[in-house]
Amino acid sequence: MNIKTNKVAVIGSGSWATAVAKMLLENVEHINWFFRKPETVEQFEKYKNNPRYLRSVEFDTDRISFYNDIDKITEESDILVLAIPSAYLPVIMKNLKTDISKKYILSGIKGIVSDENLLVVEYLNRHFNVPFDMMGVIAGPCHAEEVALERLSYLTIASLDEEKAESFAALIKCDYIYTSVSDDIWGTEYTSVIKNIFAIASGISHGLRYGDNFHAVLISNAIQEMKRFVDTVHPITRDIKSSTYLGDLLVTAYSQFSRNRMFGTMIGKGYSVQTVKIEMNMVAEGYFAALSIHEINKKYKVDMPISEAVYKILYENVSPKWEMLRLTEKLS
């Protein structure tokens, strides 16, 4: 992978895709960028920013080639960075005819392909024959909003091929982005998914006016629950206390920028799930993840009281007040 390559594509038009594009353009001379709607591209080219997300970030559009055709952008790119909600991935990829099995693909998606309960790397391997060593995962802790503000942030690139991970990490490393690499693509993806469920639980408890003392206990139990699950599903040696796992959980559970925490807060305040989905301008991955992890865990039977509490509130219409009260008796 050439650090000066002009063959890098960002697939997605949301806040995280915009943040990834900003980071890449710190080092890469030119990027390709996929937007589903042509009218969004027209506004972008006119005003030099994403009209819907992170509008404070100005771009030199001469350094960007915009695409609305998924086949054309994949044909013209060697490295693909996926930064779209997991629920939309099959919708966009179903029109793909280009062979992507020899592309290096990075997933910046913090969710599961819920129709099949597959991690993104599993979905790409099963449906597009992409080898696992040709894929990587971009993990936090990192919010797009703080990238826009150029506040110091840390990212981990997880890949079975360390050389490829190091090369991509060099493409996004800059004054405000520190990078590291890992080989734990399954654990990194699963924890990126599960932390969103815990962030919803954090938000629900906040909406119900639980205090800092309870939140500390909740997140302490959450990291233990996360460890039990990933160690069962993909048992390798990992330090769950590292920033890739614990750090990402903390920022998602506590930050004002966390859409999953916001989703949970509104649920805790008494809004219905349908109302919250309508009111929020962004997708809360934890909503879909709660169902997927519940289904996956039928096989593994890991003790996951926090995840199950969120599932019951979101999908079984159980009262947040009473379900969180029952949860408090299971925590220690």
Image (cartoon, rainbow, N blue to C red):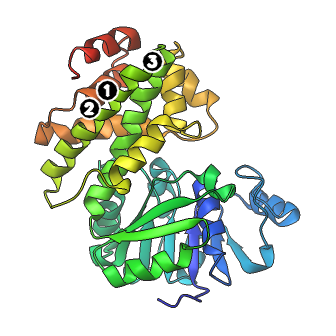
Q: Marks 2 and 3, how far apart in space? A: 16 Å
Residue 280: which numbered mark, if any? none
Q: For numbered disc 2, what is the local secondary structure?
A: helix
Left or right: where 299 falls relative to 79: left
For residue 266, what is the image quadrant? top right
Residue picked out by circle 1: 217
Picture layout, residue 181 above or below residue 279: below
Q: Nearer the viewer, residue 331 or 48?
A: 331
Q: Nearer the viewer, residue 236 or 179?
A: 179
Residue picked out by circle 3: 211
Residue name at image x 30 percent, y 40 percent: 292
Q: Amino acid at mark 3?
A: Gly
Q: Amino acid at mark 1?
A: Val
Residue picked out by circle 2: 221
Residue 67, given in percent of the width and then of the height, sits at 67, 71
Residue name at image x 39 percent, y 43 percent: 249
Q: Residues within 10 Å of mark 3 (few under 14, many from 20)?
A: few
Residue name at image x 74 percent, y 57 percent: 50
